[in-house]
Amino acid sequence: SQRVDLNDTTDPQIFLPPVIDVTVDNNNNCSATPDLPPAIIRDCSPYSVLIMTPSGVISGNGGTPALGLPQGINIVTYLVTDICGNTSSRDVTVRVIDQRPPVPVCRTLSSVSLTTGGTAVIKADSLDAGSTDECCLNSNTAFSVRRMDDFCMMPSDTVFGPEITLCCADAIDTVQVA
C-alpha cells in the first residue's frame, strides 16, 4: 500500500488596483460610502475574504463600509485565507476626494476711506458673508481676493492673496474684485 499526502502551502494571490479614488457623498459629512471592488484571487482551494477599513470590517469579497470612509487617504486591507490556513493580504489606498467647489458669498462694500497716504487695505476675510463648503470650510480656511484691474499699479493685487490695496485712482469708479 502506498500513502500520498498533498499539502497546500501556497498563499492565495490577490489582485487589486493599488489606488481607488471616490468622491464624498452628498450628505454634508465629508465621507464616502464606496462600493469596494471584489479582489481577483487565485488559489487552489476555497477561501474567505475579510476587508478591513478604518470604519470596520466587511466579511466577503467586496462591499460597502457601513460607516463610510472619511475624506482623505484611507488604507483598506484585503485579507484572504484558504481552507488550508494559508493567508495573504493586500493594502489598497482609497482616496476620498471632495470635488465640489465651495460656494462663495461675498459682502458688498459701498465705500472705503483712504488713509492720509492715499491707500486702503481690504482683507479678504472681511469680504466673506457666509461662504459654505461641505468639507473644508472652517476657521482655518484661508479666503483670497484679487482685483479685476490694476489702476493702482500693483500687479500683485491681480493675483489671489490675503488682501488688496485701493488707491486714489480707484476713486473714479467701482473696483471689481474676485
Image: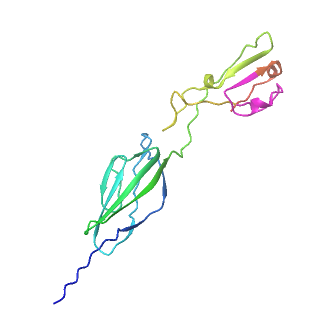
Q: Quadrant location of residue 90?
A: bottom left
Per the rendered image, the range of residues in magenta is 146-165
Where is residue 86? Give x, y as percent.
Answer: 30, 66
Q: Quadrant location of residue 114?
A: top right
Residue 147 vs residue 106, the one in the foreground? 147
Where is residue 118? Give x, y as percent.
Answer: 80, 14
Q: What is the magenta segment's predominant secondary structure?
A: loop
Quadrant occupied by the C terminus = top right
Instruction: Identify the residue at the far left of this view.
Output: 1
Residue 121 vs residue 93, the one in the foreground? 93
Quadrant occupied by the N terminus = bottom left
Q: Is residue 131 above or below residue 56?
A: above
Position of 41 with respect to 142 (left or right) is left
- Asked if residue 154 lies in the magenta stretch, the reply is yes
Instruction: Identify the residue at the far front of this view.
Output: 1
- Asked if residue 55 lies in the magenta stretch, the reply is no
